[in-house]
Image (cartoon, helix red, strand yellow):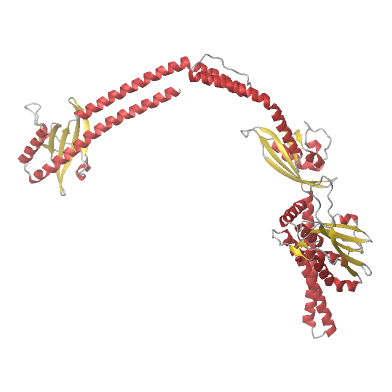
Amino acid sequence: MATLVVSIVMTGLTFFALNGIQMEARMGDTRYARDLGLLLASNVTPLAVDGRDRELARVTEEFWRSSRSLRYIFYADPEGIIYLGIPISKVDSSNDLLLSRRLELPEDLRQRPQNPLIRQHLTPDGLVTDVFVPMVSGDRYLGVMALGVNPNEAVLASAALTRNVTVAVFVSIWVLVILGAVFNALTITRPVKELLRGVRSVADGNFGARIALPVGGELGELLNGFNTMAAKLEAYDEANIEELTAAQVKQQSLIATMADGALLLDPQGRVVLANPTARRLFRLEGRRLDGMDLLPLLPDLLRMELQDPLETMLGNSRDSAEVRCTTKEPSRTLRLVLQAVRDGSGETLKGIAVTVQDLTREVELNAAQSRFISNVSHELRTPLFNIKSYVETLHDMGDQLDEEMTKEFLATANAETDRLTRLVNDVLDLSRLESDRVWSFEPTDLGAAMEQTLRTYKLNADDKGVSLDIEVPASLPKVRGNYDLLLQVFDNLVGNAVKFSSSGEMVQLRAYPWPDSCPMTPGDASSPLPRLRVEVADSGSGISEEDCRRVFERFYRVENAVHTEAGTGLGLSIVQGILHKHGSDVHMVSELGVGTTFWFDLPLEGADNDELIISAERKAAALV
């Protein structure tokens, strides 16, 4: 078929080549005849204008005799009547000369003197090119001059020779094509068919297929190469079964260790694969799930939510779906994403992949955030309302209030302003810690920060009857940290301790190196680096065990009969965030009615800054 197509294309090219050659020869004759006619017309037009017919006849005869390619020349008046021609002939003695005949020419010919009418016609003596040139002088139309020009014999001979050679070449090509087709049928077709049979066998998985034909040359090398390839594929298939099995085990291990649940269903909705996370979320641990329908295995609420989208996907009506619902016992919020698995053409359903995400933590955080916004809104509204009330009273009744009452109102407004400021500062501090800001850490005197904190809370503690104590050795080493951030840590911890302590109770700050020595056991290549441990202890009301587990959560506030103090629930979260920036963490121990102790470790001033940054990043990642 390919040979036939090539032959047909070559035939077409040959036809167009011959046609082009003939057209070129014809166009050459046409251009020559046109130029000859325009030349003669430019010479005889002045004679026709002056009416010098004898001179016109003489010039025409000389021109006709000087060119062997002219067949005839004649002239017609504006009405188309021929009045002069060379050569002149008669039909018989009884008829008029042929010059009395009338020409039928296009009406627009007289408007284009430089674009004569040219045509060709076949006569018994051969092909003749007719040229009709209008003779125009100014706006005066004098008639038409006609010439008959014989074709160029040399060009015709060259075109005929080219045509004959081309036809010969074309016939030779067809002969070679036919011989090649016969040769292919006798020597190539059978080996190619055998090779095709072997390729199909290999494609079907039969790597033992071989081709045994006594063929030489390049085709024989091709068959030998196929046999070699099939042998290597057979050996490769046998050698890689174990590797494929290992890869399958790795893939199953990866799916099994995914944080999200993963299920794979067949086109009938039966379970093919379920990883441990999915089993745990659906409470299907220890059960055999292969080949079982998924929907009957699910809790009632989840089954109702999942039934319609799953049936729609199994019916090929959609390719993906998403379901979000809440289960009970235990309470969880799950997000299920269903995605159809199709073959390479995208038409046949091979199964459905189900991804299960546990959004319980996210929902709890959103709820906590909503509670925080509600609390902050309430806390902001309360001091703002109090400030507005007292200021309005001072504004409206300033003259009626005595000096003592005016001071009381101003003191209350000032206290509410401080309360509002603390609330806003807590929110801003938390936002600042969560940003990507780079903090600078320098050698810092921790004792000075602790003493400054105690001075800040001394008046408040004296008012409540709470004693403040500090235990810091004189040779306390400096730590590597940020003074302002550490001052904020002490401010939050000491402030909470004073807030939740009653009269006669004590708040104590301690700092000391930890560990105080660095012993190395045999076989160890490293030892713990000494750090500075800081403790903030109080003998106040204490915190319950349940609240201790959540006290560092953002937006969480300890609210019970003992802890009635208002707050935003951000103080300890801010403390934890600051210490994470220092590559450390905060710990606590507490008991109701006994008191609470917070402690944390800080790196000494000689610590490596890059190591602290890496440790801080790990702390932040672990928190997320």
At a point 25% along the width and 31% down the height, the residue shown is: 25
Is residue 218 visible in the rendered structure shown here?
A: yes
Is residue 78 visible in the rendered structure shown here?
A: no
At a point 25% along the width and 34% down the height, the residue shown is: 27
Q: Position of residue 409 (x, y in %)?
A: 82, 79
Furthest-front residue in this view? 522
Q: Position of residue 398 (x, y in %)?
A: 79, 83
The image quadrant of residue 599 is: bottom right
At a point 89% along the width and 61% down the height, the residue shown is: 596
Q: Is residue 239 left or right of residue 551?
A: left
Closer to us: 533 or 434:
533
Closer to us: 223 or 74:
223
Closer to us: 367 or 515:
515
The image quadrant of residue 546 is: bottom right
The image quadrant of residue 529 is: bottom right
Quadrant housing the N terminus: top left
- Compared to residue 1, the image places residue 70 above or below, namely below
At a point 10% along the width and 43% down the height, the residue shown is: 48
Q: Position of residue 80 (x, y in %)?
A: 15, 39
Q: Position of residue 307 (x, y in %)?
A: 75, 39
- Compared to residue 184, the image places residue 527 above or below, namely below
- Compared to residue 205, the image places residue 581 above or below, namely below
Q: Number of callouts in the render?
A: 0
Q: Is residue 156 left or right of residue 86?
A: right
